[in-house]
Structures are given as structure tokens and as C-alpha cells.
């Protein structure tokens, strides 16, 4: 089903920080298909931006958001309204009025974005979707209860629990229990550095035998499946590489996941093994900037076409893997591999 019916004049709002490259890429893809359809609104919390909110209307620099067919919210990460942003240059011995202003600004925009749906604006994704994905242990448990397949996981800071979980397992990975992060190998060094009563709990998980796959999902439909391979320190050296695949069997599970988290634009990381989709991560604000440039463009084009109700291009299968882009010369990659040695073996 198309996101927006054909034959209509479509207006898509892109709310993102002014330097958000993925929003700029998507705006270009939208304009190439339907000139004038993309309305860019900068989420910089600048005094130059003016919003007006009353009982029936929401205006942003003169744009009536209720007249938009959809709003894509990018770069608005969940922020704990109680804990201030850390800074070594602030004296917390005195009252910080700037912290209060920052807190109230975030609270205002959070309420504005959350209320757009009630006012008839379709939002991808509203703040409550980000919040539901923020605490991974609670999210994983909810998905598991609903019948989806997830690896065995443990959230703890107790050493005896960690030793019991890792006993007999060849490969275990870890990640912080909240926020956006990446699963990394969990070895003796990580165990000794991370597990203690005076440290926050972390998540550890069993690893299924199979390739890690990233799926980019719009309204329950996967626009792209990307297989992933770890860096190799050569020769020839290379960073992570990606290539497009198709896993038709994974589509029902991804549609069910999107329904459960009420997420309209998601990145899902999973391993397809034993005929099941083993879910390892869900991101309500997909970050694609680290992908190879050609895959970034391809995904933006498919997203733009789907938002406009146009048919997206078919998967490009069988092409060689594409390496993650880097600003470094090849002879400097050794430094990068040393940095990433804690993540990959």
C-alpha cells in the first residue's frame, strides 16, 4: 500500500538540525520526484525560528504543519529532562538558568511533536516511539512477550550473574542498556572494566550463528536489507562492508515489530538463523551516514519514492560488497583497526 495516494499534491515536512546530512539527502530525493513537495524546518532551537501553538493549529515560521501530509522527525533524540548535559566549563555551585531554558525548550518541542498526531499530522516518528526504544531491556522483553524471537539477553551489573551467563558460550556481545549504541564483543577485559556495583548495568547477549543484517523499514515494509561483514586487517585491509540482499521470510516479523513499537521509520538489526529472525536492535531514528555513499543514495531514493506513493526500485542483488567510507588514506587504516580491536576479533 502506498504511503500517500497517487494523484494528490503531497507536502512532506522534514524537521531536522540544519546540518543533518541525511535530511538534506532525502530532501534532494523528494524534490527530484515532486518539485516543491519537501518543506525543510530546521531543528536548531534557534531564536530565529518561531512556532505558534493553539487549540487547533501549529505553525512553524509561517508553515501550517496541519497542512502537511507527513512529517519526518530526524535528529531529535530522547533527552532525560532531569539530568543536565555534562560540561566541564559550567559551575554547578550556582543556579544554572541556561539549564532551565534548555530543559524547557526540549520539553516544549517534545510536547509539540507528540501532539502533531492528534492534530492530524502523520509523524515519522513521534517522541513516544523514541522513548519506547530508549531502554533496550524493557523493549526486548515487550517484543519477546509478543512472540518475536530475540537472543538470550541479560541486563545486570552483578559479576556472578555475568559469569553464569557467559559460561559455556563461545561468543557473547554487550552494549549499554539505554540509548543508541552498537553491540561489541564481551571478553575478559570488558567484563573486568564494566561489571561492578558502582557502575550502571549493561546488556549482554548470546550470538546466533549467521550474518548480521540491517533492515530499513517504512510502515512495516522493508525498503532495504543490508548484509554486513566485519573489518579485516588484511591484506588488503578494509573497514566494514555492506551489500544488499533479500530475505522474504523476514518481512512478516519486521511488520509485526513495527506494529508493536508503533514505529513508522525504523532500522532493525537482526540475524536470520534457524529459520527465525533474531532481533538484536531497533532504532527509531535510523542513522545511515556511515553506510557507503551509493547505499545512502539508494536508500534515500527508495524512502522518497515510498513517501510519495511511488513504486520503489527493486533490490540490487549480486553486486560486490561496498566498504564503509573513510577519510583516511589506506596506509593509515592500521590506526583505525587498533581502535576497533575492542569491538571485533
Image (spheres, rainbow, N blue to C red):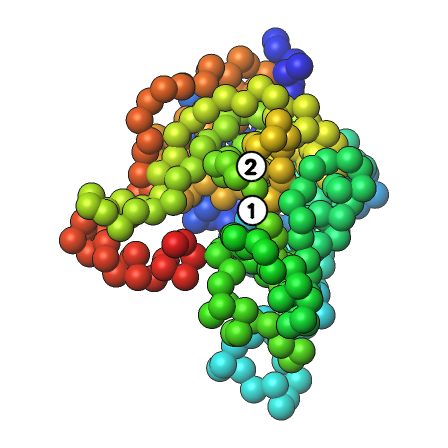
The residue positioned farthest toward the bottom in the image shown:
93
Sequence-first tag of 2 and 1: 1
The 10 Å Cα crowd at callout 1, few under 14, some 14 to 19, many 20 or more, is some
Provide the residue designation for mark 1.
Answer: 207
Gap in angstroms between the C-alphas marked 2 and 1: 9 Å
Query: Is 57 on the left-hand or right-hand side of 204?
Result: right
- Residue 328: x and y in percent read 23, 52
Q: Nearer the viewer, residue 242 or 167?
A: 167
Query: Is 19 on the left-hand or right-hand side of 117?
Result: left
Q: Is residue 32 visible?
A: yes
The residue positioned farthest toward the right in the image shown:
55
Q: Residue 93's quadrant in the figure?
A: bottom right
Q: Which residue is at a point 26% across and 50% down the rendered structure image?
A: 233
- How many marks are shown on the rendered structure? 2
Q: Which mark is residue 271?
A: 2
Residue 93 higher or lower than 295, as above or below: below
Q: Decide: marks 2, 1 in contact (CB < 8 A)?
A: yes
Q: Residue 102's quadrant in the figure?
A: bottom right
Query: Is 239 on the left-hand or right-hand side of 87?
Result: left
The residue positioned farthest toward the top in the image shown:
7
Q: Which residue is at a point 63% across and 16% down the rendered structure image?
A: 2
- Residue 175: x and y in percent read 57, 58
Q: Residue 116's quadrant in the figure?
A: top right
Amino acid at each position: 500500500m502506498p504511503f500517500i495516494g497517487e494523484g494528490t499534491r503531497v507536502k512532506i515536512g522534514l524537521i531536522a538540525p540544519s546540518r543533518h546530512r541525511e535530511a538534506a539527502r532525502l530532501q534532494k530525493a523528494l524534490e527530484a520526484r515532486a518539485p516543491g513537495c519537501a518543506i525543510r524546518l530546521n531543528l536548531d532551537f534557534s531564536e530565529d525560528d518561531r512556532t505558534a501553538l493553539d487549540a487547533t493549529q501549529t505553525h512553524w515560521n509561517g508553515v501550517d504543519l496541519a497542512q502537511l501530509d507527513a512529517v519526518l522527525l530526524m535528529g531529535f533524540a530522547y533527552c532525560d529532562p532531569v539530568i543536565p548535559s555534562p560540561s566541564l566549563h559550567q559551575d554547578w555551585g550556582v543556579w544554572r538558568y541556561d539549564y532551565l531554558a534548555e530543559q524547557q525548550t526540549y520539553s516544549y518541542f517534545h510536547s509539540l511533536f507528540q501532539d502533531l498526531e492528534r492534530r492530524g499530522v502523520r509523524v515519522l516518528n513521534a517522541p513516544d516511539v523514541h522513548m519506547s526504544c530508549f531502554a533496550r531491556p524493557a523493549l526486548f522483553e515487550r517484543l519477546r512477550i509478543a512472540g518475536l524471537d530475540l537472543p538470550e539477553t541479560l541486563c545486570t551489573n552483578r559479576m556472578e550473574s555475568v559469569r553464569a551467563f557467559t559460561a559455556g558460550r563461545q561468543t557473547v556481545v554487550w552494549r549499554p542498556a539505554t540509548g543508541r549504541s552498537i553491540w561489541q564483543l564481551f571478553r575478559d577485559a570488558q567484563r573486568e572494566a564494566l561489571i561492578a556495583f558502582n557502575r550502571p548495568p549493561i546488556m549482554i547477549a548470546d550470538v546466533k550463528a549467521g550474518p548480521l543484517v540491517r533492515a530499513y523499514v517504512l510502515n512495516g515494509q522493508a525498503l532495504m536489507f543490508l548484509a554486513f561483514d566485519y573489518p579485516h586487517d588484511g591484506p588488503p585491509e578494509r573497514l566494514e562492508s555492506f551489500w544488499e540482499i533479500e530475505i522474504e521470510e523476514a518481512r512478516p516479523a519486521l511488520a509485526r515489530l513495527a506494529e508493536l513499537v508503533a514505529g513508522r521509520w525504523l532500522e532493525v538489526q537482526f540475524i536470520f538463523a534457524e529459520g527465525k529472525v533474531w532481533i538484536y536492535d531497533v532504532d527509531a531514528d535510523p542513522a545511515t551516514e556511515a553506510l557507503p555513499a551509493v547505499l545512502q543514495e539508494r536508500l534515500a531514493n527508495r524512502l522518497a519514492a515510498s513517501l510519495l506513493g511511488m513504486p520503489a526500485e527493486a533490490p540490487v542483488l549480486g553486486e560486490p560488497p561496498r566498504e564503509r567510507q573513510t577519510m583516511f588514506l589506506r596506509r593509515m587504516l592500521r590506526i583505525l583497526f587498533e581502535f576497533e580491536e575492542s569491538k571485533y576479533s
